[in-house]
């Protein structure tokens, strides 16, 4: 298996893992994300968006097995990275370690998946 394909699969599996954590343990992500759900509705949102959506985004390229599916996930990661960077450096002055780590991963996964 070529290295780029292995990196794409690793990015997809990491995306699925990223979704499994908030799905199964939604309160465990509060320290990293800064989100503090105070009601069951907030927990539901964390499970659905940070859990279910990321699981689906990761599973889709594996099921579809098409270059465009991997590229779409890469574009999604790059879109998230752009908005995060604007938030961090321009709008919200939110340059903190967890945001910086997320930004670097999003850029790396985005580039790998788009190639």
Image (tube, rainbow, N blue to C red):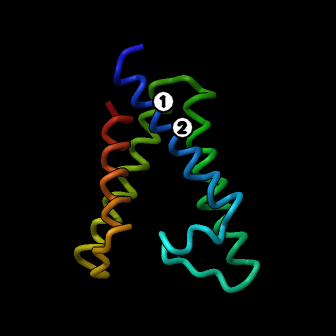
- Work out whether 108 lies above or below 48: above
Residue 23 picture quarter: bottom right
Q: Which mark is residue 44?
A: none
Q: Which mark is residue 9?
A: 1
- Work out whether 72 lies above or below 88: above
Residue 91 picture quarter: bottom left
- Residue at 48% across, 30% down: 9
Q: What secondary structure is found at the residue carrying circle 1?
A: helix
Place of residue 109 in the rendered image (x, y in percent of width and height, measured from the top left): 37, 43
Q: What secondary structure is found at the residue carrying circle 2?
A: helix
Check whether the beta carbons of the residues at disc 1 and disc 2 lie within 8 A of each other: yes
How packed mark 1 is, by other alpha carbons closer than 10 Å (few <14, some 14-19, many 20 or more), is: some
Left or right, 47 with reference to 61: right
Place of residue 61 in the rendered image (x, y in percent of width and height, measured from the top left): 55, 32
Q: Which mark is residue 13?
A: 2
- Residue at 66% across, 54% down: 52
How packed mark 2 is, by other alpha carbons closer than 10 Å (few <14, some 14-19, many 20 or more), is: some
- Work out whether 3 lies above or below 21: above
Say how many tags the image has.
Answer: 2
Place of residue 114 in the rendered image (x, y in percent of width and height, measured from the top left): 35, 35
């Amino acid at each position: 298996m070529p290295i780029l394909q292995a990196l794409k699969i690793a990015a997809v599996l990491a995306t699925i893992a990223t979704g499994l954590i908030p799905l199964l343990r939604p309160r465990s992500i509060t320290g990293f994300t800064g989100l503090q759900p105070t009601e069951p509705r907030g927990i539901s949102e964390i499970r659905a968006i940070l859990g279910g959506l990321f699981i689906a985004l990761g599973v889709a390229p594996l099921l579809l097995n098409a270059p465009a599916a991997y590229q779409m996930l890469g574009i999604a990661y790059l879109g998230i990275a752009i908005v995060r960077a604007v938030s961090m450096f321009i709008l919200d002055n939110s340059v903190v370690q967890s945001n910086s780590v997320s930004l670097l991963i999003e850029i790396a996964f985005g580039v790998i998946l788009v190639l």
